[in-house]
Structures are given as structure tokens and as C-alpha cells.
Image (cartoon, rainbow, N blue to C red):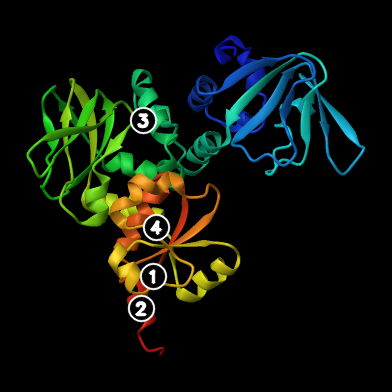
């Protein structure tokens, strides 16, 4: 792997659609991308692959071929065609094989689209909202799965409404058992997340750093804080009030469906998740539904099938909303049944 900063930026600036980025966002996406050298004969990607990268050839020649055709075409670095990402449609329509030794540039599509949208919709560069030294935490935050699902306008407005907090090592930011009032983003510093068990033992659950977020679960669930978060170092936090969080972050993250819409999605292969308790599930569940109690969502989320759509339901829709938010944060494509099972029992008007 080669540091992208060592590549001629004038060449990278011609790549489409990087050429539409503001100067600062262009510099930042270059820092967060990679250039890689491969010997002749290397398969860069295969037909049918689904990945998140835009791949450009900067030097050398790459052959694009397909399984159902004898037609081949060659993309040369530095050519007009080389300004565009190869076989960008997903699943990929071609296999890319290096004909000669090649140098390629790989860009995260999600991040690139996020920054282009930011430039074109809000007219503001992400980095212009803060100094260059603290731009790293913003990029880490924007690369989080949760933020990739939010409209650029919401993220822009979220920053506008956030308060800056200077904090010191040892400060307790949120305390277990207290009501949720703010959502936090770490601009600088490190925190420890801990929980006190019923026996009184304090257990460390996690450590978070620059660009990480915390405090959202109590706001979504309307439940008391389930953990204590303390500063391990001096730092800077940004906090967003509960009402602003619900409007700008939670609402876009939860997609609601009617029962009819859910039925159509199930016919098309979507899975059903029952997030009620095990006892409620045993008492009666929708046919074909998988039991995933709300309290197990964080632990078992990685066992769900990647790329599959899921419909979540509970009794009233409250638990479904919380589960949908938590799973969306983790990159799962989920929808919540509006009104839950209770709505299904209401007489039709």
C-alpha cells in the first residue's frame, strides 16, 4: 500500500466525481483513501462482487471482462476512461484483471457520496466547521454506519445545535440510573463505559475515543441510563439535547411499515423479527418470525444475515422502534411494524 498523499494530487483531482468536491473535502477524502500496487495478472475484483469501493486505475492497464461475452476492453491509467471508476454498478458487471503492473486508487463510496452531498446540499465543507487539527474526529464519525443513513442536512443542523463541553479526566458525563437528556460525540479524549451489577460490582464495558458517540440508547428507549460514562482524559465533547436528537437523528433512522407493506416485503424475502420477550413469543407470534428479544439485540445483531431486509414487530411498536434504531446503527437494513400487533387487532375503518 502506498500513502495517497505521495500520489500527484493534480491527477486525483481529475477523477470523477472527486473533481466536484470542495478543496478541503477533497484533501480529506484523499487522506482517507488508499493507493495500491498490484502485479500483472492480479484480479482486482470479480463480476458479481458487491463492495463499497470505487476503484480507479492510475498507472498501467486493466482488462474488464464479463462471463457472458467474449468482448473485453482495456482501461489505461491516465486516459480519459481512467478518470472514471471501473465497473461501478453493483453487483459488479465485469471482472477486472491487471494486464500490466498497476497502481490503483480505492475510495469508500459511502464516504465520497456523503461529502459530495454535503458540498452540494449544504454548501459547506465538513472541515470548514472546525479547524484542521480536529478534522479527524469528524471523518471517523461520518464513516460510522449510523451517520451514513442520515441526510446531510440533518448532520449539518445537528452540528449547528450541538454544545461544546470542555471536560477533565475523572468527570462523570452520564450516570447509570439517571434519565437520558443528551447525546454525546467525542471530539477529543477518551471515555470509559461501565455498569454496576446487582451485586454492586462495577464492570467496564467499553472504552471510546475521538469520533465515537454515546448516550443514544436512553434517548431512544425513554429508559434510564443503563451505564456510567466517565472521562479517562481531558477532552472536548459535543452534546445534543434530547429533543434535537429525536428530531434529527432518531426519526430518519426508523422506517415504519403498515401490515400490508410488511406482507409484501416478506413475500419478497424479508425476515421477521419478534422483539418481545421469549414468553410473549411462545404465547403467540407471527408465522415464520424469529425471536430476538430487545435486550438481546446488541449482543445478537451480528448473527443476522448480512444484506437481508428485516421487519421488526412487538406489541405496540415502542420496542420495535428502539430495536430498529439499534440495528440500523449496526448497518442492518430493518423496518418496524407501525403500531405493532396491537394495531392488527383494531377494526378496519
Q: Is residue 244 above or below residue 191?
A: below
Q: Nearer the viewer, mark 2 or mark 3?
A: 2
Near mark 4 (Cα within 10 A), the count class, few <14, some 14-19 or many ≥20, is many
Q: First in sequence: mark 2 or mark 3?
A: 3
Specify the label residue 343 is tagged with. 2
Instruction: State the separation of the CA atoms marked 1 and 2.
Output: 8 Å
Contact? badges 2 and 3 (CB < 8 Å):
no
**Along the polypeptide, which appears first: circle 3 or circle 4?**
3
| Residue at 37 percent of width and 57 percent of height | 292
Residue highlighted by disc 1: 338
State the SS at label 3. Answer: helix
Q: Are marks 3 and 1 in contact (CB under 8 Å)?
A: no
Provide residue 326's location: percent of width, then percent of height: 35, 50
Q: Is residue 98 above or below residue 203?
A: above
Residue at figure coordinates x 16%, y 47% from the top left: 225
Residue labelled with disc 3: 129
Mark 4, residue position = 254
Q: Is residue 2 left or right of residue 240?
A: right
Q: Horizontal placement of 61 versus 141: left or right?
A: right
- Residue at the extreme left: 200
Amino acid at each position: 500500500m502506498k500513502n495517497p498523499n505521495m500520489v500527484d494530487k493534480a491527477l486525483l483531482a481529475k477523477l470523477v466525481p472527486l473533481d466536484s468536491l470542495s478543496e478541503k473535502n477533497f484533501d480529506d477524502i484523499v487522506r482517507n483513501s488508499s493507493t495500491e500496487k498490484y502485479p500483472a495478472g492480479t484480479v482486482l475484483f470479480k463480476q458479481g462482487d458487491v463492495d463499497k469501493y470505487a476503484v480507479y486505475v492510475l498507472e498501467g492497464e486493466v482488462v474488464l471482462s464479463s462471463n457472458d461475452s467474449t468482448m473485453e476492453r482495456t482501461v489505461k491509467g491516465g486516459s480519459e476512461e481512467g478518470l472514471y471508476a471501473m465497473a461501478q454498478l453493483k453487483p459488479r458487471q465485469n471482472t477486472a484483471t491487471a494486464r500490466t503492473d498497476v497502481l490503483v486508487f480505492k475510495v469508500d463510496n459511502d464516504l465520497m457520496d456523503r461529502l459530495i452531498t454535503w458540498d452540494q446540499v449544504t454548501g459547506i465543507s465538513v472541515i470548514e466547521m472546525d479547524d484542521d487539527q480536529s478534522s479527524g474526529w469528524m471523518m471517523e464519525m461520518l464513516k460510522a454506519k449510523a451517520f451514513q443513513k442520515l441526510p446531510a442536512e440533518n448532520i449539518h443542523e445537528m452540528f449547528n445545535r450541538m454544545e461544546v463541553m470542555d471536560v477533565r479526566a475523572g468527570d462523570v458525563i452520564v450516570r447509570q440510573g439517571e434519565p437520558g437528556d443528551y447525546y454525546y460525540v467525542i471530539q477529543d479524549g477518551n471515555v470509559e463505559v461501565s455498569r454496576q451489577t446487582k451485586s454492586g460490582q462495577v464492570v467496564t464495558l467499553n472504552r471510546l475515543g475521538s469520533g465515537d458517540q454515546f448516550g443514544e440508547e436512553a434517548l431512544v428507549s425513554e429508559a434510564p441510563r443503563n451505564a456510567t460514562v466517565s472521562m479517562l482524559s481531558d477532552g472536548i465533547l459535543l452534546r445534543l439535547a434530547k429533543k434535537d436528537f429525536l428530531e434529527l437523528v432518531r426519526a430518519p433512522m426508523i422506517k415504519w411499515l403498515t401490515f400490508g407493506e410488511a406482507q409484501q416485503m416478506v413475500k419478497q424475502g424479508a425476515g421477521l423479527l419478534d422483539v418481545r420477550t421469549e414468553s410473549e413469543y411462545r404465547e403467540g407470534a407471527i408465522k415464520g418470525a424469529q425471536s430476538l428479544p430487545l435486550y438481546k439485540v446488541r449482543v445478537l445483531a451480528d448473527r443476522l444475515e448480512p444484506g437481508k431486509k428485516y421487519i421488526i414487530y412487538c406489541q405496540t411498536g415502542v420496542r420495535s422502534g428502539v430495536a430498529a434504531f439499534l440495528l440500523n446503527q449496526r448497518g442492518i437494513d430493518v423496518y418496524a411494524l407501525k403500531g405493532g400487533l396491537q394495531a392488527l387487532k383494531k377494526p378496519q375503518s
